Amino acid sequence: MPDDAAAAARAAAEEESAFSHAPVDPDGTAAYGDHPDQVIDFYAPRTTEPAPSPLVVVLHGGAWRAPYDRRHITPFAAFLARRGFAVANVEYRRGGAGPDGEEETAVAGRWPETFDDVAAALDALPALVREVLPQADTRRTVITGHSAGGHLALWAAARHVLPADAPWRTDRPAPLRGVVALAPIADFAVAGKLNVCGGAALQLLGGADEFDVRRPYADPALLLPTGIATTLVQGRADVDVPQAVAESYTEAAAKAGEVVGLTLLEDVGHFPLIDPAADACAVVAEEIAQLAW
């Protein structure tokens, strides 16, 4: 089998495995806004250790497109809960159907709603956790996200370094122990050159006419240094968001005077990072634990 065909076959098998798990219902759900997508699912820690437990905020991927919602990452959220974490699985508004009305051609993200939602969810989270998940210790919060969700995790941790006129800017860093971004779309320029997820980053920012104007408000590679401990976990065999994207972000961080960890996993593609059946998922949990505990 040619190398390209072998890589495609492996990627398809990994995706099939990750999506083979039944969705896991949360222990509680709370709204952070009026839109149906403005909700957070909470998973209580399955542990005999005394409370409280570190809180992991999960932002799902799916190229910021509507067909992919938080349900596909619930097995990963439940996996983290079994590891003793309290988990908040955030939903947010994504791009709708494409010009032909088909979900398969959904546009990536909504500007500015996708960013509005992530900012609002993080701002509302402490109060919602106290109400719905008192076992969680918000003083030990780690934010993680996969793919497009990895981008949003990095962005959420960088709101204090957004341009001064950004509506999502905060006056101080988020109270996070750290960020663990999983195969994140972390550098929009490199992602564009590689046509990651069918040009999703370009679509997220509203197309070519808006890309350069909006990129300083949205691209994690331009929002450095954050001063928040950050680790990227990346499969070397990832054909969806290639290794070069993560490497470009870590290089940008270094130029900004910040050390960002990069854990590269051999013979691992895009989806094992959130697949409870994969060894890579256990590596992710350990990376989170190193920051949380």
Image: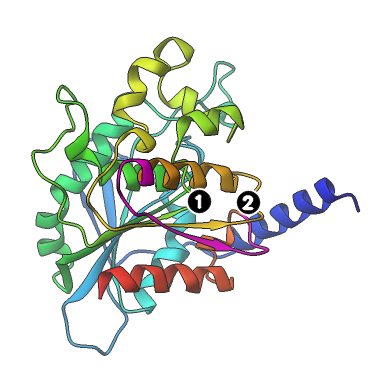
- Label 2: state its secondary structure: loop
Screen quadrant of the C terminus: bottom left
Q: Where's residue 17, x and y in %?
A: 64, 63
For image coordinates 76% across by 49% down, the residue present is 8
Q: CA distance from mark 2 to mark 1?
A: 8 Å
Q: Is residue 46 above or below residue 229?
A: below
From which residue to which does the magenta span run? 254-269
**Which residue is located at x 30 percent, y 85 percent?**
47
Residue 175 in percent (x, y) is at 15, 55
Counting residues from the start of the chain, the first of labels 2 and 1 encountered is 1
Q: Position of residue 235 (x, y in %)?
A: 59, 57
Q: Are marks 2 and 1 in contact (CB under 8 Å)?
A: yes
Q: Amino acid at mark 1?
A: Ala
Q: Position of residue 52 (x, y in %)?
A: 16, 77
Q: Is residue 131 left or right of residue 208?
A: left
**Looking at the image, residue 183 lies above or below residue 20:** above
Q: Which residue is mark 1?
A: 183
Q: Which residue is mark 2?
A: 238
Question: Which residue appears at 34% of the width and 15% of the height?
Answer: 213
Asked whether the viewer can see residue 199, the reply is no
Name the outermost residue toward the right: 1
